[in-house]
């Protein structure tokens, strides 16, 4: 009976990860609609210049993130020597994700003429509020888990600082990018409005996805490690907590990897000839 309960609990804990992956799959449809709207308009010369400038900025800052990842690999080699080989891929991924978030948070302001009076989009027009709050909840869960394990001595100081500082920094940059996307006035020319909406939609989905990956993967690893440690204890009855932690760890890692696939396909900049609905 105890094994049956453990299996049911394991499956139940996996469900949130599956639902989160499904929500991001639906978010891809919102981006496709925004891309299709751009394909059916003829932007002004100012709008085309904005597109080129935004694409160049994104590429340059993401390259900077890749460079940060390479530097982190060098630091890990200097500190951990041959044991650092297991840290190379995480260091590179962290640098790339921080580059994505930093690129969106520092995007140059479009130089087109804005409408008068100034009009601004609602948050629900750019991204699902539930998806955005799910991202914030995942970051909060990762920070709470890391702090608790750090204070209990289960994490060394070096790992604890990384597990807390990096997701927190990425989340703050994402909030800056979201705020900038919401406060920027809409363009005055109607032909540039779909282009502006696509740029905003790209930004909010990219930062939310990058922060989610940067929180889900370490959260899954921490839960998995905690569940394995608890599973080594000798108890008199059925202990379901290790099962729940291990299931949560697998769900977090699986959802993070699935979301990373979406994120890689979303790095392509907005293009005028993008007709997403006819493909």
Image (cartoon, grey):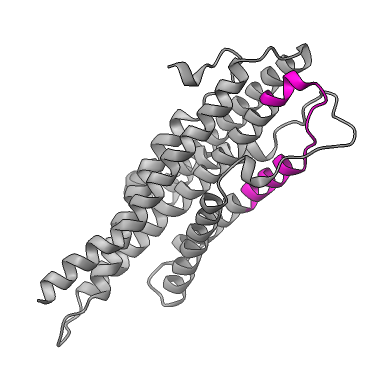
Q: Residue at x 28, y 68 (%)?
A: 244
Q: Nearer the viewer, residue 156 or 98?
A: 98
Is 131 on the left-hand or right-hand side of 20? right
Please name the residue shown 45% across and 71% down the image: 150
Q: Which residues are magenta?
A: 172-195
Please identify the residue farthest to the bottom as the structure is shown: 236
Residue 63: image location, x then y, percent? 56, 29
Nearer the observer, 103 or 6: 6
**x, y (%) of residue 90?**
40, 45
Question: Can you say whether 216 is above or below 200 in the image?
Answer: below
Horizontal and vertical percent for residue 262? 43, 35
Q: Residue 136 lies in what quarter of the image?
A: bottom right
Main secondary structure along the magenta-highlighted residues: helix
Residue 103 visible to the viewer: no
| Residue drawn at point x = 48 percent, y = 21 percent | 277
Measuring from the top left, give residue 208's x and y in whole percent.
54, 45
Inspect the magenta stretch and tell me whether residue 170 lies in it.
no
Image position of 144 with respect to 44: above or below = below
On-image quarter of the C terminus: top left
Tell me if 231 is positioned left or right of 180 in this view: left
Q: Is residue 10 above or below residue 189?
A: below
Pick the front one: 85 or 231:
231
Q: Quadrant of the N terminus?
A: bottom left
- Identify the image quadrant of residue 272: top right
Residue 177 sits in which quadrant?
Answer: top right
Say whether residue 246 is visible.
Answer: yes
Taking the magenta stretch, the answer to whether it contains residue 187 is yes
């Amino acid at each position: 009976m105890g094994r049956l309960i453990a299996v049911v609990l394991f499956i139940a804990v996996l469900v949130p990860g599956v639902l989160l992956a499904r929500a991001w799959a639906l978010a891809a449809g919102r981006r496709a609609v925004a891309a299709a709207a751009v394909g059916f308009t003829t932007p002004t010369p100012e709008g085309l210049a904005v597109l080129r400038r935004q694409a160049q900025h994104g590429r340059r800052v993401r390259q900077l993130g890749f460079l940060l990842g390479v530097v982190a690999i060098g630091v890990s080699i200097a500190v951990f020597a041959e044991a650092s080989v297991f840290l190379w891929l995480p260091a590179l991924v962290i640098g790339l994700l921080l580059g994505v978030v930093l690129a969106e948070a520092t995007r140059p302001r479009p130089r087109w003429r804005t409408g008068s009076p100034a009009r601004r989009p609602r948050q629900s027009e750019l991204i699902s509020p539930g998806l955005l709050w799910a991202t914030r909840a995942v970051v909060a869960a990762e920070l709470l888990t890391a702090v608790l394990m750090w204070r209990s001595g289960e994490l060394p100081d070096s790992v604890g600082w990384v597990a807390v500082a990096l997701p927190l920094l990425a989340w703050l940059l994402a909030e800056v990018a979201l705020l900038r996307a919401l406060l920027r006035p809409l363009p005055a020319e109607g032909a540039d409005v779909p282009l502006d909406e696509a740029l905003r939609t790209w930004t909010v989905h990219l930062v939310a996805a990058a922060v989610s990956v940067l929180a889900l993967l370490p959260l899954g690893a921490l839960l998995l490690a905690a569940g394995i440690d608890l599973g080594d204890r000798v108890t008199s009855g059925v202990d379901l907590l290790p099962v729940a932690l291990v299931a949560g760890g697998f769900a977090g890692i699986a959802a993070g990897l699935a979301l990373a696939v979406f994120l890689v396909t979303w790095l392509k900049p907005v293009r005028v000839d993008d007709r997403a609905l006819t493909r």
